[in-house]
Image: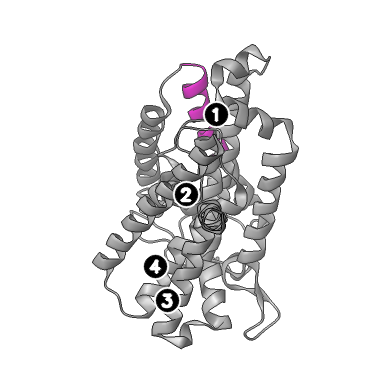
Amino acid sequence: MQTKKIQHFVTQNAIYIVLAVLVIGIAVYDPSFIGVNTLRDILIQSSTRVIIALGVAFILITGGTDLSAGRMVGLTAVISASLLQVENYPRRFFPDLPHLPLLVPIAIAIVVGLIFGLINGLIVAKFKVPPFIATLGTMVAIYGINSLYFDTEPNQSQPIGGLRDDFTTLGSGSIGSGEFSLPYIVLIAVAVCYIVWVMFNKTRLGKNMYAIGGNEQAAKVSGINVTKNLIYIYSIAGALYGLAGVLEAARTGGATNNYGNMYELDAIAACVVGGVSTTGGIGTVPGVMAGVLIFTVINYGLTFVGVGPYWQQIIKGAIIVAAVAFDMRKYASRK
């Protein structure tokens, strides 16, 4: 009986156990890993990634997938950065652009992300194109659009720099000072996580999302407008990618058309490790957050102790397989 209880606990909390084991293992190897500054760096690096992963989670829970997320992040990073350079920067993207209120370029970038998410939703819901193919097509198209925009005169594909202080403060500023300061970007990510949690658990859209992912035909029979809900969901995901692109540009202090490359795969992996089912109908915000933290701890922690990037890829792959295996056992035990 005791063995069964332990086995049940392990299968139900595999994701959190893996995260704890990773932290403890790295800390044993190098005790300096346990510190406020390290935690702060990990949270900052996780902030944009968790927003992207939450957008991807919306799609995965409906039974779809989104390969265009990373390229939307890159496009919106370039758009926001190009509109928020200091006026005396020698290679200004728009030399004659007047000083814009901070919220205007941010809103433009988020709306651009929402529009491309809307396009994804229309293609999937209206034209019945499989999500993998639909978002693969928009991924390629968005990268082309971003590259054309990035290559316009007078920029001509030069990295965009010279960003305004009020913008970069979003990515590097904090409330307070010293070790215990609270970075703005982390607070924004926490707020987004809470809003998405409410949407998942307390709104009709959230309930419909889980119903569609669980059984689309049953959802239609029960009166759910699947087409409308999918369009809403893809649009919300696009807006989240837009916000993540803005924050990524603010965090790094610049942007290029290659920003966001492969971010969608990291986001999908984090969702899967965090318990979001690739077949739809299952997933939680805390699980997604834990999945993102696991991969950030892998990247940051293993680099911290000197593990090479190739070994990091092997460890990542093993964790993905192990976490999914644990989740399969968990869902099998529920049935």
Q: Which residue corresponds to mark 4? A: 299
Q: Which residue corresponds to mark 1? A: 213
Q: Residue 81: which numbered mark, if any?
A: none
**Foreground residue among 128 and 111:** 128
Examine the rendered structure and indicate whether residue 285 appears above or below residue 131.
below
Q: Which residue corresponds to mark 2? A: 73
Question: What is the three-letter code of the residue carrying label 2?
Answer: Val
Please report whichever mark, 4 or 1, sits nearer to the chain's N-terminal start: 1
Please report whichever mark, 4 or 2, sits nearer to the chain's N-terminal start: 2
Q: Is residue 257 visible?
A: no
User: Predominant secondary structure in magenta?
Assistant: helix
Mark 1 neighbour class, 10 Å CA radius: few under 14, some 14 to 19, many 20 or more = many
Q: Residue at x 57, y 72 (%)?
A: 172
Circle 1 SS class: helix
Q: Residue at x 42, y 72 (%)?
A: 300
Q: Which residue corresponds to mark 3? A: 25
Please report whichever mark, 2 or 1, sits nearer to the chain's N-terminal start: 2
Is residue 6 magenta-colored?
no
Q: Circles 4 and 3: CB distance less than 8 Å?
A: no
Closer to the eye: label 4 or 3: 3
Question: What is the three-letter code of the residue carrying label 4?
Answer: Asn
